Image: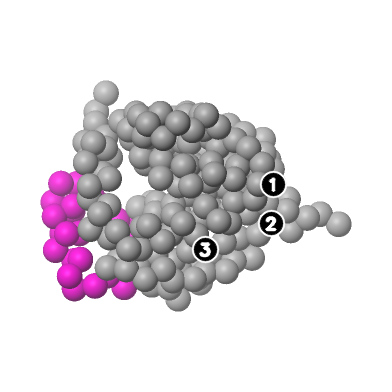
Amino acid sequence: MTMTFWDKVAKVYDLAELFNRKANAETVRRVGQLVPQWSSVLDCAAGTGEFSLAAAENAGSVLCTDLSPAMLSQAEKKVKRCGKTNISFSQRDLNSLPEADGTYDVVIAANVLHLLLQPETAVKELWRVTAPGGMLILPTYLQGETSLFFKPFVTIYQYFGFRPYWKFTLGSYRAFLAGQGLPVEVTRVVGAMPVGLAVCRKPQPF
């Protein structure tokens, strides 16, 4: 099987994340606080599992998923070290999920939409499996607001095969999600590469 860029960098991914430590740590902290007690959580494109671990502090159950087997392997090792028992794992494509409509109280897909050629397809699918009264949480790097300090690091990543399709700013990211018909709030998390923290709350049916 051909290794993807994410398979190749899985073992050093957490080290690379340190270059944007301030924004990453604060985003993980805020997302963890948003998760209600005893909720069911789906974490898509979970990478090495940082958001799954944060969600697990309050959640009843977390399904940690990624398309990359190597990333999932790293996530499993990290969760085992942390001693969390309410996190399970599965390889998934966030564009085509097997779950029924409204399965999860909380759905998280962090720092992935800017990497997708057609992010609207993923957003529609993630919203589909979000339960009425639940939340879709979409933190996404604002590459259009990257600091000069961080740009050489992004160039190095691109040399090894990193291919972002979108360079969102806070305004363009908010406009993109609103264009999908989502009731969305987007706030900026500051850092060398800021994060647009989007929270979409699904209304309860009347």
Q: Residues within 10 Å of mark 2 (few under 14, many from 20)?
A: many
x then y, percent, for residue 115:
35, 53
Residue 122 lies, in percent from the top left, at 50, 48
Residue in view at x 37 percent, y 31 percent = 81
Q: From mark 2 to mark 3, how far is it between C-alphas?
A: 13 Å
Q: Please give the residue where the numbered disc 2 appears in the rendered image.
A: 202
Residue 167 lies within the magenta run: yes
* Mark 1 crowd level (few <14, some 14–19, many ≥20, 10 Å Cα): many
Q: Is residue 34 visible?
A: yes
Mark 3 → mark 1, Cα distance in angstroms: 17 Å
Q: Amino acid at mark 3?
A: Ala
Instruction: Tell whether label 1 touches label 3 (CB within 8 Å).
Output: no
Asked if marks 2 and 1 touch (Cβ < 8 Å), the reply is: yes
Q: Residue furthest right?
A: 206
Image position, residue 89 (x, y; %): 47, 29
Q: Which residue is mark 3?
A: 198
Give how far apart the Cα atoms at labels 2 and 1 are.
7 Å
- Callout 3: helix, strand or loop? strand
To which residue does mark 1 refer? 131
Assign a secondary structure to mark 2: loop
How many numbered marks are there?
3
